[in-house]
Image (cartoon, rainbow, N blue to C red):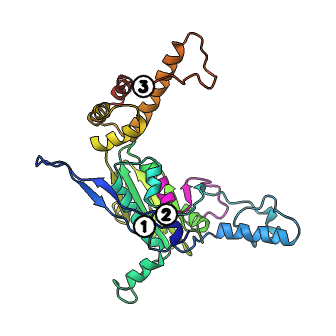
Amino acid sequence: MGSSSSSSGAFGGFSSYGSGNTSGHAEQKEEVKVTLEDLDLPPRRDLNLAAAAALQKMAAAQGGGVVPGAAPGAAGGGASGAAAVPAISITEEIFHGGDPSGQKAFREDGLVGTEGQQLQLLAYYAELCEDFRNYQRGTRAEGAARESDGAQLLLLSGAPGTGKTRHAVSFAKAVGLPLLLADPLAGAGTSASGSTWAARLRREVRGRDCVVFFDEIDRHTSDEAFASELRQLLDGVCQPVGSRVLLVGTTNRLDRLPDDVVHRAEVIRFDRPEAPHLAEMWRSHATHLPEKDIGSLAEASRHGGLTGRDVRHCASWAERHTAINYLNSQNGMGYCHGTALGNCKGPLLEKYLQCVKTRVR
């Protein structure tokens, strides 16, 4: 997953806004220092990649080049498996993994005002390091569990639009792990083996260090079978082997999840952003506005209960309408040549506020 040289400096310090100050003094920013760059990550385990490389090597040795249609993980299957019915996968890989980029991943994805939540997520970087196992040997009695494999559950809880899904994607980039989108209902009732989704997931992630993402995990929990299988995946007979699996689920209804499932998880809570965070978002989406207008936008957004998703929506809305109004005023100037919008100024404050008013909750 990269060495200390590739990740050095990726986990530099950053700050998060403290709670409101009622003493009349200027608001203090809490400095949060993340200094994990000296923890050396071992190579990421991925039997899928290893199997594909083995197939390619075998094909090259036989003078055949690339094996047509060879699927990752098919090594050792042999030609006799051609007639076998392929199992329906319950995961889809949406990020292939790479070098860990730490907090930089969140910053590059435009996530601001959530430094505390980012710190909670980044703490899992340590779970992937042998240095952390050595540290645990000094804090735990001999024979106490120091799990290097298995699954852990993180629940990102908050109102819609507060950035839970975007943080899950950025988290995978931060730790350099593949991100697999899970659909426990995929192929339900069609599996020839009758396997549960937890058993199938265990097979799919065997030998892979990865992040498995359950979007709106609470929609499954009305089914007691789902909760039961989730327990088996976390600490029962379906625990992954030969891999470290971080299960990330988003929810805006934490109360729907069984208490014992929540107790097995680390809950990371996302609140609606405050005015300073909204101002930072607006600065990145309306760079042409003076600071006074940014402050007005931030305060109107806070008063209306807007989220980061709303800021992105209103920025795009104001830009589209400003551009169309400009083009329509040019008396046939045209829409398609490269300089059509060269003299179009950025949206006015009033245009942004017009959209903000429609997003008030």
Nearer to me, 98 or 286? 286
For mark 3, what is the residue?
A: 347
Spatial CA span between label 3 and label 1 = 41 Å
Question: Residue 89 falls in which quadrant of the image?
Answer: bottom right
Give the image location of residue 193, x and y in percent. Answer: 65, 64
Q: Residue at x 54, y 13 (%)?
A: 330
Q: Which residue is mark 1?
A: 124
Mark 2 touches mark 1? (CB < 8 Å): yes
Which dot marks residue 175? 2
Q: Position of residue 307 (x, y in %)?
A: 36, 40
Whether the magenta-drawn stretch holds residue 165 is answered as: no
Camera sees residue 2: yes
Look at the image and give the residue range highlighted in magenta: 169-196
Indicate which disc, 2 or 3, sits on the residue closer to the N terminus.
2
Q: Considering only vertical position in the picture, is 144 above or below 43?
A: below
Name which of mark 2 and mark 1 comes first in the sequence: 1
Q: Earlier in the sequence, mark 3 or mark 1?
A: 1
Crowding at dot 2, Cα within 10 Å, few <14 / some 14-19 / many 20+, comes out as many
**Separation of marks 2 and 3 at Cα, in angstroms:** 38 Å
Q: Residue at x 24, y 53 (%)?
A: 18
Binning the other alpha carbons within 10 Å of mark 1 as few (below 14), some (14 to 19) or many (20 upward) gives: some
Q: Amino acid at mark 2?
A: Val
Which image quadrant is residue 30 in? bottom left
Q: Residue at x 38, y 90 (%)?
A: 142
Q: Position of residue 63 (x, y in %)?
A: 89, 68
